[in-house]
């Protein structure tokens, strides 16, 4: 059993394509995060200018203190929106990286099983037990990987639900405080 130049070329091409997919995903994530960050910084700068102008226009101490307390609510809402945006981008990135990893694992498994089949055809008599054991170990590893993937997805869903609940709680508290 020999490895042909075409097989080496095919494997190299698959690896390069995987690296390019990961690089594209990383670039997209960095771009989204940079846009979120730039928007947050611009908004914070504009808010600070508007708030400073409002404070400078205050006629007395009571109005000054009243203005300061009104600035906290929008800032809190913007901080929540910023955190949620960053969380969404990182969750998307994690999903994309998981897809790439799953594809590579599936390709590796398929190639490995094909290789085992070829080796078992040319193997000496009595080696069927060893090949079956390797296939069994591979199946167990795949099963463990699938279970880990399922648990990770469930944990991600729980985390997303907790983030949504926390966001709603903070918004509810902010509205209640504003109403009071």
Image (cartoon, rainbow, N blue to C red):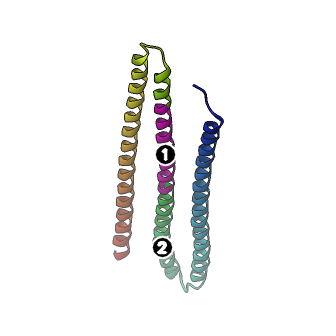
Question: Would you call the spot at circle 1 few (<14 residues within 10 Å), some (14-19), or many (20 or more)?
Answer: few
* Residue 74 numbered tag: 2
Q: Quadrant of the C terminus?
A: bottom left
Depth check: give the residue in front, 59 or 32.
32
Question: Would you call the spot at circle 2 few (<14 residues within 10 Å), some (14-19), or many (20 or more)?
Answer: few
Asked if residue 105 is among those painted magenta in the image, a careful observer would answer yes
Q: Quadrant of the N terminus?
A: top right
Magenta residues, as a range?
91-114
Mark 2 or 1, closer to the camera = 1
Query: Where does the image place residue 152, in percent across and percent down from the top left?
Result: 40, 44
Label 1 residue SS: helix
C-alpha gap between disc 2 and disc 1: 44 Å
Asked if residue 150 is among those painted magenta in the image, a careful observer would answer no
Label 2 residue SS: helix
Q: Going by the image, does 94 lie left or right of 17?
A: left
Depth check: give the residue in front, 14 or 6.
6
Residue 166's place in the image compared with 41, above or below, is above
Q: Earlier in the sequence, mark 2 or mark 1?
A: 2
Residue 146's place in the image compared with 139, above or below, is below
Query: Where does the image place residue 142, in percent across and percent down from the top left?
Result: 40, 35
Query: Where does the image place residue 139, in percent across and percent down from the top left?
Result: 38, 31
Q: Going by the image, does 144 lie left or right of 91?
A: left
Residue 129's place in the image compared with 162, above or below, is above
Question: Residue drawn at (62%, 57%), measured in percent from left and top?
Answer: 27
Question: Residue drawn at (48%, 70%), measured in percent from left and top?
Answer: 72
Residue at numbered disc 1: 103
Depth check: give the residue in front, 53 or 172.
172
Question: Residue drawn at (54%, 84%), measured in percent from left and top?
Answer: 60
Depth check: give the residue in front, 104 or 148.
104
């Amino acid at each position: 059993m020999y490895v042909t130049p075409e097989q080496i070329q095919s494997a190299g091409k698959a690896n390069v394509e995987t690296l390019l997919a990961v690089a594209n995903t990383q670039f997209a994530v960095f771009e989204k995060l940079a846009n979120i960050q730039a928007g947050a910084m611009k908004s914070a700068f504009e808010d600070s200018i508007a708030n400073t102008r409002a404070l400078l226009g205050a006629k007395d101490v009571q109005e000054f203190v009243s203005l300061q307390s009104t600035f906290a609510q929008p800032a809190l809402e913007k901080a929540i929106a910023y955190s949620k945006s960053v969380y969404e981008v990182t969750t998307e990135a994690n999903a994309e990286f998981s897809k790439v990893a799953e594809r590579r694992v599936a390709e590796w498994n398929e190639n490995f099983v094909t290789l085992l089949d070829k080796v078992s055809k040319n193997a000496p008599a009595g080696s069927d037990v060893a090949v079956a054991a390797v296939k069994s170990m591979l199946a167990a590893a795949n099963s463990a990987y699938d279970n880990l993937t399922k648990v990770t997805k469930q944990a991600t869903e729980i985390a997303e639900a907790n983030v949504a609940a926390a966001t709603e709680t903070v918004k509810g508290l902010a509205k209640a405080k504003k109403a009071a």
